[in-house]
Image (cartoon, helix red, strand yellow):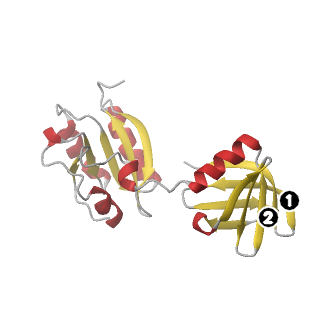
Amino acid sequence: MGREANCHACVGAERADAKALLEATELILRGAIKRRWPLSALEAVRVEGDALCFSVGPESVSLQLGAPEAGKWADRIAAPPKSLAAKLGLAPERPAWVLGMVADAALADALAGHTAPSPATATQWLAVLHEPTELPALLGQLQGAAVPALWAVYPKGGAMDAAVRTALRAAGWRDAKACAVSERLTATRYLPPSVR
């Protein structure tokens, strides 16, 4: 999840109050001044007093965020984004048992080298769901299994998200974390009924 703040913005010769949003890959200004910059385009990022300052092409930018917040934004911009594998907690020593067909390139890349040969050797399960009709079969596989945690990966959108959440919560699972997988998929991490 990104950061957001209401601030006074100076972009080139423009001066106005705006809403700034710091997302995973871009910084967005909304309000009287509208801009959308990829983080990779921000140059000379620094804190001056209580302002986050940087340049983008020919424009100099100053966002009056307040001293502590400006520093946090500068640190976040300087830090490389986490890989999808890191967001999902995947590593060679933290493999996932995968259920379902992985057709998404971003998810396949994240899982490369991080899958378990059996449920017993997995530190988490990852279920790829395409339709709500797949939920009963997933719940059947989870029942009675020693599952440390489950990532449910499914298409973005309210109906699918609601179906997954409703089914897993009804079975006693608790959602603990979420992350985007790709333009098309999202993931939610669930803890089993015994973990509170």
Q: Amino acid at mark 1?
A: Ala
Q: Quadrant of residue 84?
A: bottom left
Circle 1 SS class: strand
For residue 55, side relative to residue 175 (left or right): right
Q: Residue at x 76, y 43 (%)?
A: 67
Residue shown at 65% from the left, 65% from the top: 42
Front residue (pair 155, 196) = 196
Asked if the residue at tag 2 contacts the one at tag 1, i.e. Cβ–Cβ closer than 8 Å, the answer is yes
Q: Is residue 91 visible?
A: yes
Residue 23 visible, this orientation = no
Within the image, what quadrant is residue 28 found in? Answer: bottom right
Secondary element under disc 2, as helix, strand or loop, is: loop
Residue 194 lies, with reference to residue 73, above or below; the image says above
Question: Which quarter shows the C terminus?
Answer: top left
- Expressed as whole percent of the image width and height from the top left, the position of residue 183 reads 44, 64
In-front residue for pair 137/95: 95
Name the spot of residue 182 as percent of width and height, x first.
41, 61
- Residue 90 vs residue 56: left or right? left
Residue in the foreground of this view, choosing between 73 and 141: 73
Crowding at mark 2 (Cα within 10 Å: few <14, some 14-19, many 20+) = some
The disc placed on residue 147 is: none
Q: Which mark is residue 33?
A: 2
Looking at the rendered structure, which numbered label has been put on residue 16? 1
Note whether 72 is above or below 128 in the view shown: above
Residue 146 is situated, as x and y percent measured from the top left of the image, at 19, 32
Residue farthest along the bottom direction in this orientation: 58
Crowding at dot 1, Cα within 10 Å, few <14 / some 14-19 / many 20+, comes out as: few
> Across the whole image, how many numbered discs are drawn on residues?
2
* Residue at 31% over, 62% down: 109
Q: Position of residue 143 (x, y in %)?
A: 19, 34
Q: Determine the CA span between mark 1 and mark 2.
A: 7 Å
Q: Amino acid at mark 2?
A: Ile
